[in-house]
Amino acid sequence: MRTHKLGEADRIITVLTREHGKVRAVAKGVRKSGSRFGARLEPLNFVDVQFHQGRAMDTVTQVETLAAYGASTSTDYAKWTAGQAMVETADRLTPEEREPATQQFLLLLGGLNALANGEHEPGLILDSYLIRSMSIAGWAASFDACARCDEPGPHHWFSVAGGGALCSDCRVPGSATPSLETMNLLGALLAGDWFHADASEAKHRREASGIVAAHLQWHLEREVRSLKHVDRTPQKVAPAMTVDEV
């Protein structure tokens, strides 16, 4: 997910694993030109990595590339910035090292795969990932029924602090009033309904991305710095023919 320089030739890497959650380890000599696996330990890559367990921090002993998502997204600014926002969010949502986070791992892997393969517009993949990762973390937002009284929607009001959509009786000061189309888009992104998400208009995507970013950063209580660099320019992708998952 990220790397930090250590000494003259080493790096500290942070990875999200399938069974052991977030792990930090030292990769020795990876900044040297002759390193055996320096390029494999770049952010966004899906790798099979082995560690030697140490007292303070593990050491990387072997790395095999399973999918070079970093290389396939680095030439496309929109994909690269969306990917960076995804891994930064995954890092924030897995604060405890070695705490199993299998669902977060699988969601991130699926999102990076969809991003690298250009299955949908990068901004949509990112927003779907953010909404769903927040749901896994226990901060699911309601985009249909009222978040307070559970009255069936659709509703006209939305509050990040209030948990999502609010009816007229439950709305709180400062509630936003997103369009019905935007709320439907948010619901589609949460459900993985790509048929309807891909058919959405640019103006509703922009409004939805603002709501998603506000929801994310309000619960994290800190800024996700990568989000400010994400390229939201509309891109042409092949239309989805069926409903699938990220």
Image (cartoon, rainbow, N blue to C red):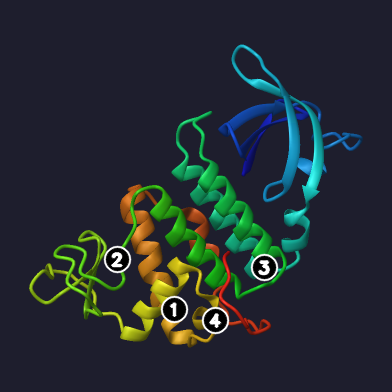
Element carrying mark 3: helix
Q: CA distance from mark 1 to mark 3?
A: 18 Å
Q: Mark 4 or mark 3: name the one nearer the start of the chain.
A: 3
Q: Mark 1 or mark 3: name the one nearer the start of the chain.
A: 3
Rendered residue at 68%/60% (across/down) = 113
Q: Mark 3 or mark 2: name the one nearer the start of the chain.
A: 3
Mark drawn on residue 77: 3
Labelled pair 1, 3 in contact (Cβ < 8 Å): no
Residue type at mark 4: give it. Answer: Phe
Image coords of residue 72 (percent x, y): 77, 61
Q: CA distance from mark 3 to mark 2?
A: 31 Å
Tell me if 173 is positioned left or right of 57 in this view. Answer: left
Rendered residue at 31%/55% (across/down) = 218
Among all residues in the image, which is located at the extreme right? 34
Residue type at mark 2: give it. Answer: Ser
Q: Which residue is labeled 2 in the image?
A: 142
Picture quadrant of residue 117: bottom right
Tell me if 123 is positioned left or right of 149 in this view. Answer: right
- Which quadrant is the C terminus positioned in? bottom right
Element carrying mark 2: loop
Q: Crowding near pointer 4: few (<14 within 10 Å), some, many (20+)?
A: some
Q: Which residue is labeled 4 in the image?
A: 195
Labelled pair 4, 3 in contact (Cβ < 8 Å): no
Q: Crowding near pointer 1: few (<14 within 10 Å), some, many (20+)?
A: some
Q: Taking 140 as reference, is 52 above or below it? A: above
